[in-house]
Image (spheres, grey):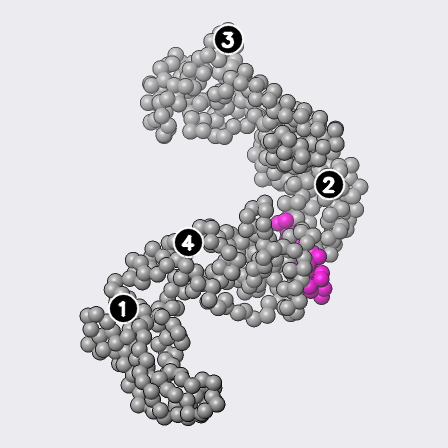
Amino acid sequence: MTLHLDGCHVDETAAQITLLLTSTQAIVSCPLCTRLTRRVHSRYARMLADLPWATCRVRLHVQVRKFFCGTPDCPRRIFTERLPAVAAPWARRTTRLARLLSALGLALGGATRSKLTAQLGMAVSPALLLRRVRSSRCPTSSAPRVVGVDDWAFHKGHRYGTILVDLERRRPIALLPDREPATLAAWLKAHPRIQIITRDRSAKYAEGAREGAPHAVQVADRWHLLKNLREAVQRFLTRQHACLERAAASVPQGQLLEHTTTAGSVAMLSSRSAHERQQNRAKHYARSCQVLALHHQGVSQKQSAQTLGMHTMTVRTFLRAGAFPERATSRRRGQLDPYVAFLHQRWLAGCKNPTQLWHEIVTQGYCGTPRMVRRYIARLGQHVKALTPEQRAQFMRAETIFKTPTVRRATFWLLKAAEALTPEQQAFITQLCTLSTEIKEVQTLAHAFVQMLQERHASRLRTWLDNAEQSTVSEIRSFATGMRQDEAAVTAALEYAWSNGQVEGQINKLKLIKRQMYGRAQLDLLKARLLEAA
């Protein structure tokens, strides 16, 4: 059987495939002195690995001519004939096999690619595939005009890099080893055609953009502006936990037991005893007192966290709260929650057999175990055992109580529009604003800022900043001060449609590629794989 490849013929046997030259040209030129020579010294043979045939490994036995240069002073006395369509000089593999290995290395990560090549009949080591990835040329893009910049984590909390994305072509164009202003400025100076730079609120990126591209327009990302606002409001509400408790206590759900099947579920009895909850609160309160004591002694937040074995953010939360921040009483929704009202009704009707009750709620769609029903009925019996008949009936038919939301959840409710909230959430926010004029002021300013971003009214920014800087809430004043320092980029965010959304998406792709590489994600490998995948 004979295969024809690029002007050559291949004679195939069971042991190997031999590639024989058919060219009859005897006159060649020296690659250095370009003199012609006719003297053929011998034939040079070598083995080349090629693409597998089905699952069988294939090797090409290549014989090429070796020449002597006829020029006495030529430094290259001996040279061989090149086969650019078959293999590169000094290569051990054909060009098409090398291209396939590079494609596999760029597409897959970690030891997975080595296992796949073994199954395909191309047994190579993981190190060889990594070398192929490193030797691959990253695709070159034309000069970008609009770029987005953001950071990404080599090791979260310790080491970060920078990614730059061409927002017009929606593809990454560079990975930088750190997030220092000088590194970004050097890259921007090498690309002078950039006109718009989108970024988050990072001061380092703002400085790097000013130094590297002073003519470019910096655009602050609108999502990060909303995030900064939410963080400021959340810090403020952390100090207002007493108001949250009072507002939640004055908001009944208004849903009687007989209406729960259509209007919602009643609250389950907690599986934790009152004594256990008190112990947990006492422990939490003691840690808060320790943090405040160290703070009054002049100990820094970082040193306090190391001394008490706590996270720095926990120490910061205790200090910002001013008083002891009570933990929210909210609980995640369980499988049994939708059927609690029915269980209460059957209890009042006299059915107290957990197995029978389990069978009845299974017909309604319950997928849990009988043990869960048995434990809840036992808690229910212990709770109503000490009550009088009147108190028992009142407990079983009482309106459910609105639980105090977490500070994070209350922040989202305060920032949302009224039509996006449930009636209970609207009542809670109304009570909250009634109890504190500061909370009402924060809500008004926050809604005005959100509306300004949504409608993109740049003319309202200065008026809003003036009002925020005169606020009685320190967190809002601090937020407005930061906005004033970055006013040009914030104004551009309201005038231009560009944002960092595409950059965040590319960071998610980068995280996936990084985790696929099982600890071998050096910067050069990540750059080759990410830019090739784009």
Residue position marked by numbered label 2 in the rendering: 476
Residue that appears at 64% across and 52% down? 200
Task: Mark yes or no: residue 356 visible.
Answer: yes
In the rendered image, which residue does mark 3 sit on? Answer: 387
**Mark-to-mark CA distance, 2 and 4:** 48 Å
SS label for mark 4: loop
Q: Residues within 10 Å of mark 1 (few under 14, many from 20)?
A: some
Per the model, the C-alpha gap separating discs 1 and 2 is 71 Å
Q: Disc 2 on helix, strand or loop?
A: helix
Q: CA distance from mark 4 to mark 3?
A: 64 Å
The mark that comes first in sequence, 1 or 2, is 1
Whole-percent x, y for residue 43 in the image: 31, 83
How crowded is the residue under tag 4: few (<14 C-alpha within 10 Å), some, or many (20+)?
Answer: many
In the image, the segment drawn in magenta is 205-224
Give the numbered dot on residue 349.
Answer: none
According to the picture, the residue beneath numbered tag 1 turns out to be: 58
Closer to the camera: disc 3 or disc 2?
2
Residue that carries the numbered disc 4 in the rendered image: 110
